[in-house]
Amino acid sequence: GSHVQPTVMGEHTRIHGLGLISVVIFGLSQVSYLRGSLTHANLSDKSIDMRRSVRCWPLLARLRTSLGPHRGNLGIRSASLRSSALESSKTSGKVISPPLALGERFSVAPMMDYTDRHFRFLLRMITKKAWLYTEMITSEALIHGDADRLLRYHDPIEHPVALQLGGSDPDSLAKGVKKALPYAYDAINLNCGCPSDKVSGRGSFGAALMKEPDYTAVLCESMIQQAAATDTPVSVKCRIGVDENDDYHYLKQFVTALGDVGVRHFIIHARKAILNMNLSPKQNREIPPLKYQYVHRLVVDFPSYSFVLNGGVKSLEEADEFLKAGVAGVMVGREIINRPWYWGDVDRRLFGVENPRLSRREILGNYSAYAVVEMERDPRLGISTVLKPVQHLFVGERGARAYRRTIAELSAKKVAVDEILKAAINCIGDQDLDQRWP
């Protein structure tokens, strides 16, 4: 398709290059992409009333077609491969991964089946500053699958955005990084924390890598050397330990091993991973106790490294307290999924800049237009997939249950996506729809 170039004109956004596509928002007014203007919609009742507040979000001007990450199958590494990789690493030159140019004061955790491009599109209407992550993509999927569909995103409005890779073979991970570099992600992250059986069991990567610090260092080194071509930072997301290897000394050794090959940025989920008891990922988020003190000790013991704390953070107040205690950043996962609107004050509270300040009426209007375009471009895209990100926008407020039920019932009936949101929004009162963060 043609390149999309937005220009912002006051309260209006003009979109060029999208061709002859017309999008009807909520069946009441047209937003037209006619190689010309995306103008405000004249909507009434409890629909998105942009006559009251015309704030057409420029994200709509950067739509890109891509698919969610494919879960590729990785072969379990052999002892000979591990030995060969460790030996070759001894002769390679050391490259230090550069620091994250934009920092990572607050970030949204990579989560399978959640942090796809649709959810990231929604979040950029809520926060401009938070770091966003892709779902984990295996290096094998990039090598043997359609890398372009896996890696494309809503550039440039998604920045800062990081790619998370999964894998257990240094050559494969290096090739995965090489595939990703042209897409200009702000960082590339290695998953060393996922406890699911598919990943840490049969796949022998994710949290399983924490059992082999030296070999994991080889993986990181291969990624860093490849990423040096564009000075792209390579980071690691891990737990504080795995199974019986769960004391602070072991975590320090793990960080030391990775630091010795140039890793300088770590995201630490402050729970250990339990792989030897057949726990589900959900149980691995709940049963192992949080040990924030381990992360704070890392900050003291490695003053030239940066550490982002992850796990159990439920509020902006808690995030602020952790930042004041010295961590470089805070990462939040399920709480963002469960109540995305709550985090709409993060830019002001944690970054000291103005919030986007879109109301949920405006967010849903923009998202409706986005969803229509996405489904026209990719007929295989399911309604439930594209509407999943907006289901929890009104959690805890009057009409929220009816809102979610309406989306579910009409999605099952294959009603048009804009008509579904038109019906769902009528379940919510004007006061909640038009609320804005300071």
Image (cartoon, grey):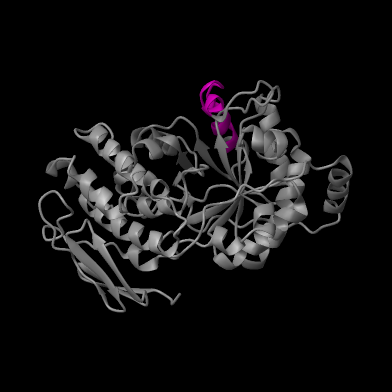
Numbered range of the magenta stretch? 282-299
Q: Nearer the viewer, residue 422 or 434?
A: 422
The image quarter containing residue 150 is bottom right
Left or right? Give the position of 294 relative to 73: left
Q: Nearer the viewer, residue 324 or 65?
A: 65
User: Is residue 288 within the magenta segment?
Assistant: yes
Q: Position of residue 269 (x, y in %)?
A: 55, 34
- Examine the rendering and report whether any part of residue 231 can be seen: no
Left or right? Give the position of 5 relative to 56: right
Q: Position of residue 4 (x, y in %)?
A: 39, 74
Q: Position of residue 410 (x, y in %)?
A: 30, 44
- Examine the rendering and report whether any part of residue 67 can be seen: yes
Seen at 67% across and 32% down, the residue is: 251
Q: Position of residue 114 (x, y in %)?
A: 46, 44
The secondary structure that most of the magenta stretch takes on is helix
Seen at 60% across and 56% down, the residue is: 233
